[in-house]
Structure formats: structure tokens, C-alpha cells
Amino acid sequence: MSEKEGMLEELQDTINQFRKESRSQSMKEPDFIKEISNSINKASDYLEKKSSSQIYETHPRRDTLESTSSSGSKSKRNEEQKKNLQYSETSTRTETSQSLSSLTGRTAEYQALVNFLSHDTVGEVSPQVSEENQKQLSLEADNFTVNLEAKGLQEFPKAILKIKYVKYLYLDKNQIRTFQGADSGDLLGLESLSLQENGLSSLPSEIQLLHNLRILNVSHNHISHIPKEMLQLGNIRQLFLNNNYIENFPSDLECLGNLEILSLGKNKLRHLPDTLPSLKNLRILNLEYNQLTIFPKALCFLLKLISLDLTGNLISSLPKEIRELKNLETLLLDHNKLTFLAVEIFQLLRIKELQLADNKLEVISHKIENFRELRILILDKNVLKNIPEKISYCAMLECLSLSDNKLTELPKNIQKLKNLRKLHVNRNNMVKITDSISHLNNICHIEFSGNIITSIPIEIKNCQKITKVELNYNKIIYFPVGLCALDSLYYLSVNGNYISEIPVDISFSKQLLHLELSENKLLIFSEHFCSLINLKYLDLGKNQIKKIPASISNMISLNVLILCCNKFETFPRELCTLENLQVLDLSENQLQKISSDICNLKGIQKLNFSSNQFIRFPIELCQLQSLEQLNISQIKGRKLTILPGELSNMTHLKELDISNNAIREIPRNIGELRSLVSLHAHNNQISYLPPSLLSLNDLQQLNLSGNNLTALPSDIYKLFSLKEINFDDNPLLRPPMEICKGKQWYTIARYLQRADERDEKVLGKIFKIVANNITETNFEFLCQKLNLANSETDMPTKSTVSLSERAHQALVVWKTQSNKLSLTAAALRDQLIRALAMIGAYEIMDKITALNLFTRAIKF
């Protein structure tokens, strides 16, 4: 197949994909509509990521381009809010589902697209268009999206606009600076344009030609001001300017009356114009992470606003006028300087989500009872000492997060929050969990970590919808038996308490998948654990366990087992029956050897045996063909001195940590670990790197700090995948430590390459010095020391060839023979100098010393 035919075939694939997308566009909701719908109807992951509200950039037929909030996923919204958010869904669905007449007669336009997409600047090739394909294209809908992301474009693709059905154009990650040369007539059909990550310092003045533009995304550029030409886009509905350097927002906003979404997150805005209410149709406004010190009063008169994000500013108070935002449903004010809330905020009767984390609030008004529609309330990282009882009137509340405050108790009538699903009260001063929690029939997830709770009420067993409980770092003495009656509980974490016994009741929790009990007072591995046949993750680290029961073989689903920091003196062979075990951590015990039965762990991928008391490297580990990560660092244990050659049997090994031992050398066959990505060998006694190390083509991390290396191999450039290197605290001479301090692989490799070139030249000069100054007697002795022949038979022309020529020829032969042993020019130089010293050729050595001093003074 010719190159041209290949190019044309690739374009045909691209066109077919476009047609498929275009066809699906008219038959189903765009992806962004599904995103909004999901964010309205699902709250289960909300507090997992401590999220803020997300505003989606609604470009058709493409996954959400950008979340304009700080992080996380959207929380659940009720049906009324879903209806409100559909203002952009309906319009965009209408725009993207229109079906026009056939495209017969547009062959020229199609050919223009072919020609453009085959142009070098695009970086993609395009196929020849057959008549059949042209005919098929003519039957497609008129709505068309072209994605030219990351094609290396340096100017606006004028030719693409000859295609009248191009409405949605994505030019992200290029270097486009101007629209110069684009015909205004060709721009009229464009409705959506994305120019993210183009390095734009300003918007081209030609932007005003895009009269029908409805969506414009120029986020992630270097724009410092909004030009007046953009203010002429009267049909614009959604405007995204996130992650730029905008300091001022223009005041001439009359023409932007149709704007519905405005996102200016992560800029440098200090104030907003008083004319902002001119945006009379604005419904979503994102101003997160700017430099606003006051809540601009102008915001209060955006009467259709339903979502306002002011996360990460410097706002210390709210104006009374905030009461005018009657339609507001989402208000995000995390990471500000609020010390109190203006009472007028409680007049926002439609509010559904209120985020106030990381402020300085000391009290919440009892008027919170007005928030009858509130679904999500985030008050983490404040200085609250109590929550008003009247929060019970917020009957629709689903997520309540109160972590990192100074609470000693919850409202007594919290049981009235019948819709509450998530309750987070981590790191407060809670002494107990109220019995009334049992009336929260819909609660799914509770967190009370970092308090001083001593017991869990048995009544919690009535909360049958609970799936996840976290009670880490409290003062709990007895395992909370009430949790064992929860049929839906799959995740339980009770680390850092004082539990010493496991009740038989846990045997009934067969639905448990994840159990953490580290840093408790357990003396034995309870046989009751062995009844948890579905458990996948078990953490019993930092207890006082000495042995494992044989019945552990019943835990057929166990994938991860953590037993670090216990009292094991011998390796528990019982673990070798866990055929599905993938991760095993037995670090910081007293193990001296490993049972050969470990080979039965056919699926093991990660092993941590660091800080034990091994007499020698446990060679039994080398049988584990599936192993990908091995940590045998001995920062607290007995130091290993030798690594076995059998280590190379672990061909799937990706990460190896042998740090903090007394290892003197790396096995010469280390290069057989072809999959190795990370090698940590710091704080050992390694003085030499074997040549096979340089064949580890996938190696990305190499830490050899704190060893005895004096020289790095010249061919280190062969490790072309290296990203992180560390040679600190070695007595390095080649290259010197100042070269290695920057930890730049290229710098080190380049130095060594040039050093080799210099050493070769220096060695050549030394050969000449020796040849020109050596005596016949010393030459005979030198040949003996270097194992070189110097007889009449070897040199039949001895009588006619000068001593200087014979000496130089002999040294060249010696170098050739030595090269077979992979000796460097520097090593040959040192060997030659030692030989000269032994034969007493001190005059020659003085000349060589002078040469060395001179060459060392030359920087390169």
C-alpha cells in the first residue's frame, strides 16, 4: 500500500467515526447531559473526595471538558433542581439533534475536508474518497463535530470552515494565536469553539466574527484581559475562561444578555463590575480560587442564578443583599475567611447545597431551620462547638460533614433527619455516639475517627442500610458488636483503639469485604476472622500476634493481608494456603527465614519483608514468578550482605527495594529482570555497577545514594527510561558529585560521554609520552608487567623499527586486548601508571602527572 493510499484510508476511518458520532447525537442525550443527570441523582461518592460542586462545560458529543470546581464529584440533586439544570440540556439537545436534508452536491466541501485533514500541520493522514463513500456521507445529518486536538496547528484552520456543516470545533492543545485570514462568511456556522491550552495571551480580535457562537472555551491559556470584541458575541450561552491570568472583568456587558454559564475559576480577579446584573440570564457562575476579598454585591442581583462557586477566595463576610438570590440552589464558600454568616443567608429558601469548609465559623444560626430543601451541608475545618437543634428541620438533608471542629456532641434530635445518608464527625471532641442514631434509617456511611469515643451503642444495629463505618483513633475497648448485625456493612475501619478480643459475632459478618484493626491490642489471630469467606482486605498490623490458625485457609477471597509490626519469629506456613493472596506485608517482625511453601502463593504480586532478622537473603522468594514488588529493606533489621544470582528468576519484578543493608555488589545478571521499573539500593556498600544493569530498558527510578561508588559506567545513557536518579553520598570521582547533585540523567550521561572522549585523547598522549621516553630495558620490563610479547619472533623488523615505534605499537596492542575486558580508558591509564611505577620509570610518570594536572584544569 502506498503512503498516499494509507493516508486516505486513515481519513476515511476518521470520517466514519464522525458520522457515527453525528448519528448518535440526534438519537440520544449528549454525554454532558448524562453527567449532569448522574450528578443530580447520585451522592454516594460525594464526601469520599471532599468535593465541591462541578459545573460542566456542555460541549456536545464529548465527555465533560473541564470541571470548574476544585475537586470531587457532584452530590445528589432533587428532581426540581434537575429540572432547573435542564435549561442548557434542552437547548443543546435541540441544536445537536437537528436533521437536515441530504448533503448531495457537497462533494467539493467534502473534498476540502479531505484536503485539510491530509495537510502536514494536522499530523494525520487521510484516505481517498470513493464515490460510494461520498454518497454515504451525503445522507448524514448536518450537525458535525471536528476534533483537531494536539495536532501542532499554529494558525486557525481556515479550510475546515469551508465545510458548512462544521458547528463544533475543538482545537485544544495547539499553538493557535490568531484567526487571521479566516473569512467571516465561513465562520457564521460555528456554534461551539474550544481553544484550551493554546498558549493564548489574548483573544484574537477576529473572535467578533463568530456571530452564531454559543459555546466558547479558552480555559488553560495565558489570557490577562477580556477584549471588547468578545463582548459583541450576542448569542453566546456558555463562556469558560478558567485557569488564566485575568485581573479585571469588563463592564460593558449589555450584549451578553443571553449568557447562561460563566466560568472564571482560577484567575486573579480582585473585584467585579457593578454592571454584572446585565447578565440577566446567568444561571451558573464560577469564581473559585480568585482574589476576591469581599462578596461583590453585584452578584446578589443576578436573579436567575442557581449555582455560585466562590471557593478559595478571601471573603470574610456576606452582604445583606444576598437575600435577593431567591433561586440559588448551590452556594460554595469553602476555603475563605468567614467568621460568621449574615442572617440573610437563611432567606435563600431554595438552597440545596451549602459548602462552608475551611473558614473560621464559630456558630451556626438557629435560622438554619429555613433550609427545608437543603441536601448537602459541609462545615468541616471551622471552630464550631455545637450545632443548633433546629437543624432537625432540614428534613431533606442527605450529607452532613462536621469534621475538624470542636464538637462534643451532636444535636439531640438528630434522629429527625430521616433522609441523612452520610454523617462525618471526624477529629472533634466527641465522647460518645448518641443512641438516637439508631433512628437514622437511611444512614449509609458514618465516620467518627479521631475522637475520644469509648463504645458504640448497640442500637446501631437498627441502621440496616449502613455500608461503611470508620472509627479510627478513639478509645474503644470492646469490639462494637452492634456492627456485626449490619447485613449491608462491607467496610469497617477501627484502627488505633484498644481492642484486645474479637467476639464470635463477627463470624456473622460474611458480607464484609474490608476490615482494618491495626494498632490495637490483639494477642492472637482470632479464628472468628476465618469465617469471613468474602473478606478481601484485612489489616492487623501493629498488634501482638505470634501465629496464624490453620483455619485461615477458609478465607478464600483474601487478596491483601497486612501483619506488619507484630511478634512473628517464624514465617507462618499457614499463609501459604491463601491461593488468591496478592499482597502480603510481614515487615517489622522477627523472621529469620522463609518457608519453601511460599511457592504455593501462585498469585502473589507484592511482598514486604523489610526490617526482619534474616540470616541470609531468603532465596525461597526467587521461586515466585508472579511477584511484581519486593521490599527487603532492613532499616531496623539484620543487614544482608549478599544478593543471590537466583534473584533474576523473578522476571515479572517491577519494584525492588534492597536499601539499608550491607550489600557489597549487585548480581551480575541483574539485567535479566527485564520488567524492573524501580530499584532502591540506597545505604549499602555497593562500589561497582555491573554492565548488565544497563540493559534494564524499563528502569525509571534508580536510588543508589549512600554507597561506595567512585565511578558510574560510561554507558549509563542506555538507561533511556530513567526519570528519577539519586547518587548522593557516594565518593564519586567520575562524574564528580557536583554533576550528580542536580539528579539530571541527561547531564550525567552527557558528562560521561565527553569524559570518555577526553580520556581516550589523554590515553593517546600518554602512549606517546611513554613511547618517546622509555629505555630499551624499561620497555622489556613494561612488556612483562603488561603481559605483552617483545621478542624477535613477534617483531621481525626489530632491527629496522625504532624503539619509540615499537613501544607505541605494543601499547596499542595492549589496549586492544584490554578492550575485550570492557576496561575504560581511565582504567587503562591507571593500570599503565602502576606498571611504570613498578619498573621505576619515574621520569615518565612525572610527565604523565603533569599532563593529568593540565587536563583536570580544563572544564567541560
Image (cartoon, rainbow, N blue to C red):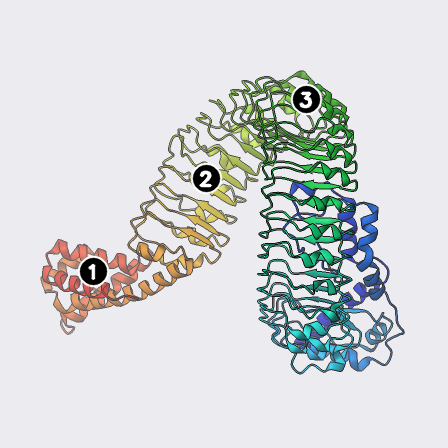
Could you tell me the amino acid type at mark 3? Ser
> Can residue 788 be seen from the camera position used here?
yes
- Which amino acid is tagged 2? Glu
The N terminus, quarter of image: bottom right
Q: Quadrant of residue 830?
A: bottom left
Q: Residues within 10 Å of mark 3 (few under 14, many from 20)?
A: many
Vertical placement of 280 versus 573: above or below?
below
Q: Position of residue 555 (x, y in %)?
A: 65, 26
Looking at marks 2 and 3 on the same chain, the residue that comes earlier in the sequence is marked by: 3
- The residue wearing badge 3 is 531
Looking at this rendering, what residue extends furthest in the right direction? 101
**Disc nearer the start of the sequence (1/3):** 3
Point out which mark residue 646 bears: 2
Residue for badge 1: 789
Where disc 1 sits, the SS reads loop
At mark 3, the secondary structure is helix
Which quadrant of the structure image shows residue 119?
bottom right
Q: Nearer the viewer, mark 1 or mark 3?
A: 3
| Mark-to-mark CA distance, 2 and 1 | 41 Å
133 is higher (above) or lower (below) than 653: below
Amino acid on which the number 1 mark rests in the picture: Ala
Q: Judge depth for marks 2 and 3 and give the one in front.
A: 3
